[in-house]
Amino acid sequence: MPARGRPIGSKSKAWADAVRKASHAIDPKAKTKKLDLLARALVTAGMAGDVPALKEIGDRLDGKVPQALVGGDEDSQPIRITRVELVDL
């Protein structure tokens, strides 16, 4: 019997491809890419003080702040790797 669904490890990018195609389409009214209009809307929202918009702009321009790897609880200390060694058996 053939396997169903996507093969293990494969990633369908149908949604990403559709969004990319739609965002690169030209808006007939504005005569520019819809992606440019979205970027302008994001900056406009940031200028109006929209905190999530400001965070998104910062993340896109400066990159996201690195997050510490921690154990199971919020109060756990960060995981620290001091040495990784390959051993032949």
Image (tube, rainbow, N blue to C red):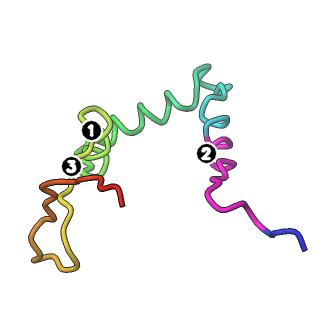
Residue underneath mark 3? 66
Task: Tell me the residue at 60%/35% (across/down).
Answer: 23
* Residue that lies at the very extreme toward the top in this rendered image: 31
Q: Please state the horizontal and vertical placement of residue 39, each as a whole percent of the image.
A: 43, 33
Mark 3 and mark 2 residues within 8 Å of each other at the beta carbon: no
Residue underneath mark 1? 63
Q: Quadrant of residue 9?
A: bottom right
Q: Above or below — where is 35 with respect to 6? A: above
Q: CA distance from mark 1 to mark 3?
A: 9 Å
Residue underneath mark 2? 16
On the rendered structure, is 20 left or right of 74? right
Q: Is residue 69 magenta?
A: no
Q: CA distance from mark 3 to mark 2?
A: 25 Å
* Residue that lies at the very extreme toward the bottom in this rendered image: 73
Label 2, secondary structure: give it: helix
| Lower sequence index among marks 3 and 2 | 2
Q: Please state the horizontal and vertical placement of residue 40, each as a whole percent of the image.
A: 41, 31
Q: Which three-letter amino acid code belongs to the residue tagged 3? A: Pro
Label 3, secondary structure: give it: loop
Give the residues in magenta: 5-19
Q: Main secondary structure of the magenta part?
A: loop
Label 1, secondary structure: give it: loop
Q: Residues within 10 Å of mark 1 (few under 14, many from 20)?
A: few
Task: Tell me the residue at 23%/34% (across/down).
Answer: 62
